[in-house]
Image (spheres, coloured by chain):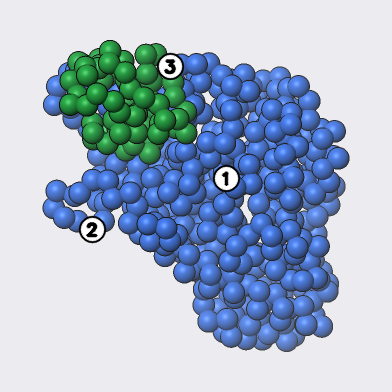
Amino acid sequence: MTIKINGESKTLDRTALTLAELLVINKVESPDVVTVQINGKFLERSLFGTTRIQAGDEVDFLYYLGGGGGR
Amino acid sequence: MKGFTTKAIHGSLQKKDPHGSLRVPVYDSVAFEFEQATDMQQAFEGRRLAHSYTRISNPTVAEFEDRVRLLAEAAGVIAVSSGMAAIANVVLALAEAGSHVVTSKFLFGNTYSLFEQTLKPWGLAVSYVDMTQLAELKAALNEKTRAVFLETITNPQLQVADIRAVTQVARAHGVPVIVDGTMTTPWLFKSKDFGVAVEVISSTKCMSGGATSVGGLIIDNGTFDWKQNPKVRPWVEKCGPRALLVFLRREIYRNLGACLAPHNAYLQTAGLETMALRMQKSCENALQIARWLSQSPKVSRVHYPGLESSPYYAIARSQFSGGFGSLLNFHLTSRKACFALMDQCQIVRRATNIHDNKTLILHPASTIFCEYSLAEKSHMEVTDDLLRLSVGIEDVEDIIEDLAQAMENL
């Protein structure tokens, strides 16, 4: 299936997978602290294991570490 | 990886050092470079995990934050420049002018000063209650209350409230509980399991490995629905369930500038690795000394939650795992007697700190609480005949022998 991850198109060699599996497949950095948005909606961490990714989904992995720093 | 000290030593094992260093180095750099402009844009948008500027985040500080997060089993941690900075950041994030905070009437002197002298003139209303009296807490809560604040073991009174009961009362009103867990740390008290929303810690104390550096921690346990707080709510809508951490990182903490120095983070990460061993020893020492002081004819009263005679023994035993802390207090006959004992101490040092490796003694009324009126001190039960002993990790026989010789001529 093809989905968008952080704005970039990505084709996955899978027909079905959960968000928790996507975190592993996509080698998402610091999965314990990442914030996830699917199609603009934030997901609670407790739902990562049961949320199924669908073709065409727009998935964003967010960290909010930086932002408005140095002079 | 389940063990407390195993987690403290190894952390998340996320990134391998390019040189194979077993310690995360001190990244004493202000700014961090990006390969491309789009990488920089993504970092600023929050779409890339990257450090840009050390006032906001830094790799050495992030390693310390991550290890504490693992130990607390929390949603996230922000390390700051001191324990007071941790309290100030959280209160400024949750409350605004015209709003209200309920706090224990027993507070560390500087925390009381923060509420009473710094924040009140900016329009924050503060109610001081006895947290062991839930009726007092319930009566103080109102529609403008933004937080309930208390210390896990109050300093210096050593009162221990039923924290689960406090959080239940506050949550029924949609109010988060902030605890200052400096005296307990996640080794003695897992605040998440008691419904606490945010824990603040002075990492200067148990974590720094023997008073090596000043630092503080803000721990969001991830147990509170931040939509209930009017200031954090817009951040929930904008940034999701980690809203408080993002609000702090992208506004309050960033703008106040109270970041932890990378060198201090390095020292405190090293300190964290041996914290359980040190706390176990200091707690054992404190219990032995408290028992010994209780038998002394020169001492009228001893306060220590680990003594079975303490009114807080039962709740402390049920809430804390592994001990009762390393702070104890005792009463002599007067300030003069307190000073005489202090001046005779050889091994026990006269200094204002707690959870040092060294045992420290202090007269609270003439030091930490010297700026307060007699009425205020009386309200906080800081009397002129009270001494505070922060028990270290020395051989306990030597501490007892030192205190015994110092008491001889009283």
Q: In this view, does A61 lie to the left or right of A45?
A: left
Are tags 1 and 2 found on a single chain? yes
Q: Under tag 3, what secondary structure? A: strand
Asked which quadrant contains residue A24, the reply is top left
Residue B29 to residue B143: above or below: below
Q: Under tag 1, what secondary structure? A: helix
Three-letter residue code for mark 2: Leu
At horizontal 74% and vertical 45% (from top left) the residue drawn is B165
At horizontal 27% and vertical 16% (from top left) the residue drawn is A55
Residue annotated with mark 3 = A41
Per the model, the C-alpha gap separating discs 2 and 3 is 39 Å
Measured as percent of width and height from the top left, residue B230 is found at 62, 19
Q: Which of marks 2 and 3 is in front?
A: 3
Asked which quadrant contains residue B99, the reply is top right
User: If the image is split into quadrants, where does the C terminus of chain B sit?
Assistant: bottom right
Q: B84 or A48: which is nearer to us?
A: A48
Q: Which chain carries label 1?
A: B
Q: B397 or B321: which is nearer to us?
A: B321
Residue B86 shows up from this direction: no
Three-letter residue code for mark 3: Lys
| Residue B192 image label | 1
Figure colour of chain B: blue
